């Protein structure tokens, strides 16, 4: 029912509505996935999307509606998706919805709605959560197969962590026609630490995601709104007064007109919002206060029970609020505040005693009859209301129950604050352990488990430390060992270097002939291998294999075999690596262990890359990723495979595809070590393309500049290589030489042949660059590099090509890289060979090599390399090379900035648009001016139009 204070005329949003339909048309073609609609509270986002949804539905589209509520941040996981799914079930029935999914898959949706039966009992929390995400993705895809589908999610600034993760997942992975997600959020709520900010920034970089900002109304639009509400044209003075005081926010315009002919504007926003409420009858206001305690949406039956009113009495009391458009009638006999600001303001007006009594009444009624709230919401509703009622006993019990419910729905980040509440209330409830059936330490353990699953490492560490203080290792050694192992996992995720000591402590606690002993040996030996301590790791693996085979644990046996393969890989024995991984893979298939199968696949991809068998590596990567999707292991094994996939693409020059893989993987929120590995791949491409700012950002995050301690030899080597490349790109050979000296002096370096020879080939470049100014230091580095080279094996064509580059046989190296289809390495080798030819007086030979190198570098958009090739071409008289298109010189981000510059936007405007700092924008603008050869923003805009850079 629409109240009289809302204009019947749709005012001032024609452009935005047209933009939504343009996005919808593009979505029908599979070119657009989502629209992010931002705007201030009260600016009209809801009305805009309602109009859009109504027209889409009228045109035959399936429109699903879901909204986030403020309660979500406390633990109401997946609230918008549950609402949309409930609507779909109501319209089509559970059987029809289940028929859209693979057989048995509907049980994953039972986490959200009980209509789908009993949820799958899945102890592997990441697996269940990932599978739930996959089923919702599949459901949308199947719906879109039948007809266009629009999913509207309102108020994502209140979205819980699980909903945010699912939104990011869907946005990244919906790549089919006929489906569009429209999301709204309050832009004025996004403070610097707001959890939605990084999500918006990430989604803003996803292809197919459109941003739409809803501005305030202009003066003329306010006048149109007032005319619609009043039913007549208002006089000029009144329009001026309302526009000046409301500042063009439609909700404020409505409230001012509701306040009477004088259009008075209350002193505070809360007064403004409450103005329309205070004009209602006292009994209506009393019931509204009761309703506000129930949240933005409350069912008729629940409100009647809490208020003690009969159906007729309740309807009579609420009728003025509905007529005044304070409340609206929703489906399933529920009432919704027209705007959440109204509910917030009314709730904030409750007196302390009134606040407690009302929340207690809600808790009592829901406890007596859980059907008063939508299915699955009772635990979290009870936790919210008992806590609001300040009832410590039931607040603790209900928070514990809600946390368990969150675990079943894979909403681990929502479980953490609920468990923290249990811990906070523990001392206030004398018999807390008996009440929930778990002691204080068990709550800490459960909280650490939730934090681990949800990726909250800092809180997880805090929980583990607190639990360990409460346990005696002599009485409960197994429990202590489990916590120590979890602490090791947290420290490893944070990149700490003392993980080995944690695992040694855990090993000390368990009997030497037990399965538990072998279970600790597996992660301990793997970490030792990664640290380069191959001998000790091999001894432990032999011991672990004996125990695993003796005790019949074949999955543990295969884990240890893959650890052994890791040692062979470090020694350059790639053929035996593949053989061991294949042996482990066969065991995994026999035991039907998805984890083992995927780990073996990921390891083999890495080995194939090292052997130069890139096409096989790419095929296996794609197969492995699809298998991980199928088995619900996206965020574990799937991300490991994606990292190797990106590496394979990077090596053969398919850089844009590699970047897409990296960004897609980063959207899943990988563990820190995995994130760093992905960022290193991205940094390699950024270095090659001369993206200084991006390289600096990545190396700062990874800790390269501060020389953050690393214990894995592969990370030590790769960080050093990136640091050297950074200094060379900046024209700082002395600093690059210093970085080379540091890595050669490091007590631990990788014995892995490919990594070693790759680093040595780069060290030759450093020495050649620094020799003129630092001859003695350069000679020392060359000598030390020769010692390292004498210890490295040369197995396979990739290692051989790097060895040839190191030894200075650049023509042979270029031929090797050509056979391996590695264009960037080939172009670099050709350039080095051309330099040698030019110095020997062979100008024609140099020119011939440069002619081959230039198109390779240009195709990759490897700007620094192109610049070097063109400069040498001019010096040897090879003729002016064909100029590169200006659009190829600019990075995608620079093109985005240039587009906004041509619109006359300021640096501050551009920063807000792209979710970056104004300083970063300034750097981009400087780079653009330099690349276009202009000096002003106006000249840059003119050049953009002249060269059709943005068409």
Image: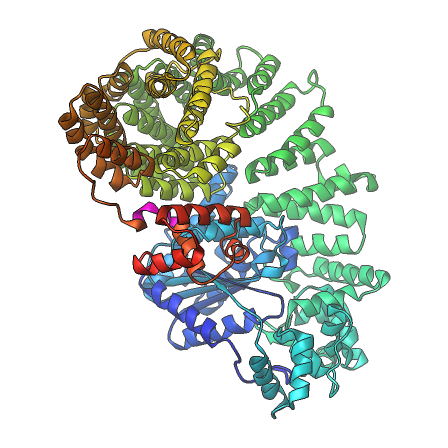
Q: Which residue is at the far right?
A: 353
In the picture, residue 174 is in which quadrant? Answer: bottom left
681 vs 908, left or right, is: left
Percent position (x, y) of residue 648? 31, 33
Q: Give the range drawn in magenta.
A: 888-892
In the picture, residue 499 is in which quadrant? Answer: top right
Percent position (x, y) of residue 571? 35, 13
Colour scheme in the image?
rainbow
Name above or below for residue 746 compared with residue 161. Answer: above
Name above or below for residue 823 compared with residue 42. Answer: above
Name above or below for residue 734 compared with residue 601. Answer: above
Residue at x 47% of width, y 18% of height = 738
Percent position (x, y) of residue 99? 38, 58
Residue 107 visible in the picture: no
Name above or below for residue 721 compared with residue 324. Answer: above
In the picture, residue 755 is in which quadrant? Answer: top left
Residue at x 40% of width, y 27% of height = 728
Residue at x 73% of width, y 73% of height = 272
Check the picture and name the quadrant holding the C terminus.
Answer: bottom left
Q: Main secondary structure of the magenta part?
A: helix
**In the depicted view, which residue is nearer to us: 836 or 436?**
836
């Amino acid at each position: 029912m629409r109240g009289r204070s809302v204009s019947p005329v749709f005012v001032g949003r024609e452009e935005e509505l047209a933009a939504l339909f343009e996005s919808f048309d593009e979505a029908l073609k599979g070119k657009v996935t989502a629209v992010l609609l931002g705007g201030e509270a009260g600016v009209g986002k809801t009305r805009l999307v309602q109009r859009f949804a109504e027209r889409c539905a009228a045109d035959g589209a399936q429109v699903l509606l879901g909204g986030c509520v403020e309660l979500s941040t406390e633990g109401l996981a997946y609230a918008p998706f549950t609402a949309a799914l409930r609507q779909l079930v109501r319209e089509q029935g559970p059987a029809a919805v289940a028929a859209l999914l693979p057989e048995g898959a509907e049980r994953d949706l039972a986490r959200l709605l009980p209509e789908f039966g009993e949820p799958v009992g899945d102890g592997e929390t990441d697996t269940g959560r990932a599978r739930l995400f996959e089923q919702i993705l599949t459901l949308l895809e199947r719906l879109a197969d039948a007809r266009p589908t629009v999913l509207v999610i309102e108020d994502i600034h209140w979205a819980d962590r699980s909903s945010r993760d699912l939104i990011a997942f869907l946005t990244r992975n919906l790549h089919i026609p006929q489906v569009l997600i429209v999301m709204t959020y309050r832009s004025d709520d996004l403070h610097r630490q707001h959890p939605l900010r990084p999500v918006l920034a990430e989604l803003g970089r996803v292809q197919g995601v459109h941003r739409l900002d809803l501005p305030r109304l202009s003066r003329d639009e306010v006048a149109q709104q007032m005319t619609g509400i009043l039913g007549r044209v208002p006089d000029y003075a009144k329009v001026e007064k309302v526009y000046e005081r409301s500042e063009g926010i439609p909700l404020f315009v409505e409230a001012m007109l509701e306040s009477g002919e004088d259009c008075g504007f209350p002193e505070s926003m809360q007064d403004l919002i409450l103005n329309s409420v205070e004009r209602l009858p006292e009994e209506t206001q009393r019931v509204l206060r009761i309703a506000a305690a129930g949240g933005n949406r409350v069912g008729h039956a629940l409100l009647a029970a809490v208020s003690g009113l009969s159906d007729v009495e309740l309807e009579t009391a609420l009728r003025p609020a509905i007529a005044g458009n304070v409340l609206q009638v929703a489906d399933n006999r529920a009432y919704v505040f027209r705007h959440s600001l109204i509910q917030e303001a009314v709730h904030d007006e409750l007196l302390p005693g009134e606040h407690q009594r009302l929340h207690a009444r809600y808790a009592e009624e829901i406890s007596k009859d859980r059907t008063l709230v939508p299915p699955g919401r009772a635990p979290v509703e009870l936790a919210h209301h008992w806590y609001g009622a300040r009832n410590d006993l039931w607040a603790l019990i209900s928070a514990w129950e809600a946390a368990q419910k969150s675990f079943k729905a894979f909403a681990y980040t929502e479980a953490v604050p609920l468990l923290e509440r249990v811990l906070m209330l523990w001392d206030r409830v004398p018999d807390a352990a008996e009440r929930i059936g778990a002691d204080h330490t068990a709550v800490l353990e459960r909280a650490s488990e939730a934090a681990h699953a949800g990726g909250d490492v800092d809180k997880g560490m805090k929980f583990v430390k607190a639990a360990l203080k409460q346990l005696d290792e002599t009485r409960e050694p197994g429990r202590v060992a489990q916590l120590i192992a979890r602490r090791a996992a947290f420290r490893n995720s944070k990149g700490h270097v003392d993980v080995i000591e944690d695992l040694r402590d855990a090993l000390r606690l368990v009997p030497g002939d037990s399965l538990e002993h072998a279970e600790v040996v597996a992660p301990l030996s793997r970490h030792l291998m990664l640290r380069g301590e191959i001998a000790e790791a091999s001894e432990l693996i032999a011991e672990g294999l004996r125990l695993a085979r003796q005790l019949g644990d074949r999955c543990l046996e295969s884990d240890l075999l893959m650890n052994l393969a890791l040692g062979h890989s470090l020694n350059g024995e790639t053929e035996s690596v593949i053989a061991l991984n294949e042996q482990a893979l066969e065991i995994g298939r026999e035991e039907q262990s998805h984890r083992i199968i995927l780990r073996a696949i990921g390891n083999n991809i890495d080995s194939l890359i090292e052997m130069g068998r890139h096409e096989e590596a790419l095929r296996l990567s794609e197969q492995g990723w699809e298998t991980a999707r199928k088995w619900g292991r996206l965020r574990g094994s799937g991300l490991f495979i994606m990292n190797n996939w990106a590496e394979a693409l990077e090596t053969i020059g398919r850089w844009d595809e590699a970047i897409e893989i990296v960004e897609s993987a980063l959207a899943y929120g990988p563990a820190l070590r995995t994130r760093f590995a992905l960022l290193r791949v991205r940094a390699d491409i950024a270095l090659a393309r001369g993206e200084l700012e991006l390289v600096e950002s990545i190396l700062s995050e990874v800790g390269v500049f501060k020389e953050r301690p690393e214990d894995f030899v592969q990370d030590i080597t790769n960080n050093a290589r990136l640091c050297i490349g950074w200094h060379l790109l900046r024209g700082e050979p002395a600093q690059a030489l210093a970085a080379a000296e540091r890595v050669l002096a490091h007590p631990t370096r990788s014995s892995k042949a490919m990594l070693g020879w790759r680093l040595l080939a780069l060290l030759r470049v450093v020495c050649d660059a620094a020799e003129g100014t630092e001859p003695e230091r350069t000679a020392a580095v060359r000598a030390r590099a020769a010692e390292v080279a004498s210890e490295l094996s040369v197995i396979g064509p990739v290692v051989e090509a790097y060895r040839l580059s190191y030894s200075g046989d650049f023509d042979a190296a270029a031929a090797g890289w050509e056979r391996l289809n590695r264009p960037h390495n080939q172009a670099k080798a050709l350039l080095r060979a051309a330099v040698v030819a030019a110095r020997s007086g062979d100008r024609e030979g140099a020119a011939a090599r440069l002619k081959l190198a230039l198109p390779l570098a240009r195709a990759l958009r490897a700007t620094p390399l192109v610049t070097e090739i063109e400069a040498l071409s001019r010096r040897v008289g090879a003729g002016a090379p064909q100029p590169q298109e200006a659009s190829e010189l600019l990075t995608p981000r620079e093109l985005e900035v240039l587009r906004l510059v041509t619109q006359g936007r300021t640096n501050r405007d551009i920063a807000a648009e792209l979710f970056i700092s104004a300083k970063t924008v300034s750097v981009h603008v400087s780079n653009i001016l330099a690349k276009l050869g202009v000096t002003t923003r106006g000249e840059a805009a003119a050049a953009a139009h002249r060269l059709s850079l943005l068409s």
